[in-house]
Amino acid sequence: MNPSLSTIDIYSSVQNSFMKVTVVHYGEIGIKGKNRMFFERKLMNNLKKATGKNVKKSDGRLIIEDHVDPEILRKIPGVEYFGHALKVRPDEITKAVDILLKDRDFETFKVIAKRYDKSFPKTSMDVNKEIGAYIVEKYGKKVSMKDYDLGVYIEICKDSVYVYVDRFSGIGGLPVSSQGKVVSLLSGGIDSPVASFFLMKRGCEVVFIHFFNKTLHTRDSLKKVEKLVDKLTEIQLSSRLYLIPFYEIQREIIARVPSKYRMLIYRRSMMRIANMVAEREGAKGIVTGDDLGQVASQTLDNLNCIYSQSRYPVLPPLLGLDKKEIIEIAKKIGTYEISNLPYEDCCSFMIARHPETRGSPEVLEKIESTISGLDYLEKDALERAEIKQFVYPRR
Ligand code: ATP
Ligand code: MG
């Protein structure tokens, strides 16, 4: 399942007339009944965008012309697994096997044939036996049903036979933009990029919002947030980031609100602005990186105070994870290193050492009512937002 990437070089050094293709399997979207076509089309479009190659359908899998860098396909939601294959006629399977096994280091192998074209005269088992015997005789290797060094995959489809030995795992999930749009509150910390990833993996298009305070953040320090969005764009292929100035709102809050409540009032304000962005974007949910009990603002009472400011469902996918589980995922998707760059989130600006952990919506509403023009300030912040666009592959 995890061959070395150097196999790509072996293929390219082989002079042959067989077409090199990448066979892409999708798991979950294959069983979506009537919606199946819709999901397939989304995935096809995303694969075309990510690879710049032609993609077509063949008997319940997608075929990309050429061998695509596994690092690209590993990140595309909806891809269950994929293989670098040679596209051949049924009478050319052994030729393809010879090419694929050239200079391969292995002792045991297993042939895994699947007949998707039921009009093909041999069964999968026949092909397994025939090709297995061929490899035993010609290469002196042993068949092993379990724990084999090399899998030889043969997929017999209507249009062609696809043969490969390099099979790679994808991330699964559903194709991006098959589930509509959400707005994600991205802080620059470790958690919120991972939360955004989870929504992408389940097929959402994620629009990012980041609040910054101009006295804490220079243009340069905002590069960190842009880097995070750029990294996450490898998954969803195109992204929009709203950089929303928060200084003016924070200034008013600091003037009126006792320090122990400020964090909660900041976050309620962020939530209301996120709702305005969702409305503007036609998004249907708000994503946060909250993780129950992790910090003072994330007790159940406080989340209640914050989330009550949203008309849209708030989706916090990390709620049940431990920090170390979140870090592991951040490392896998490549955001961890970026998140660790120095940066101070504006939520930590002028707050008490011991912030309120049991906020009550009534108390907070009362405090907010003492800040005159808060709703105007919130609308104005959005008006002054800088909106940045990201695409992958990068131009
Ligand atoms: P993270 O690692 O995502 O920063 P955290 O554990 O540090 O999370 P908080 O700082 O309390 O927790 O933030 C909780 C959530 O609030 C974040 O995950 C994010 O969704 C949102 N958030 C906080 N600060 C900002 C900000 N400046 N801009 C946008 N969203 C923010
Ligand atoms: Mg944070």
Image (spheres, rainbow, N blue to C red):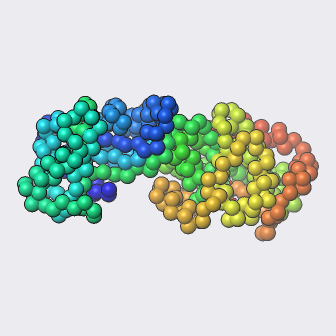
* Position in image of residue 255 (x %, y %): 87, 55
Q: Is residue 289 visible?
A: yes
Judging depth in this view, the residue of 287 and 227 nearest the camera is: 287
* Position in image of residue 315 (x %, y %): 66, 48
* Position in image of residue 350 (x %, y %): 78, 61
Report the residue that reaches farthest toward the left.
138
Figure quadrant of the N terminus? bottom left
Residue 107, by quadrant, is: bottom left
392 vs 342, left or right, is: left
Please, is residue 206 above or below residue 151 in the view? Answer: above
* Position in image of residue 196 (x %, y %): 58, 49
Judging depth in this view, the residue of 72 and 262 nearest the camera is: 72
Q: Is residue 99 visible?
A: no
Residue 16, by quadrant, is: top left
Judging depth in this view, the residue of 14 and 1 nearest the camera is: 1
Please, is residue 199 above or below residue 349 in the view? Answer: above
Write the residue at 78% across / 54% down: 304
Write the residue at 70% across / 51% down: 213
Write the residue at 80% across / 53% down: 305
Write the residue at 63% across / 46% down: 184
Q: How many marks do you count on the picture?
A: 0
Figure quadrant of the C terminus? top left
Please, is residue 294 above or below residue 151 in the view? Answer: below
257 vs 266, left or right, is: right
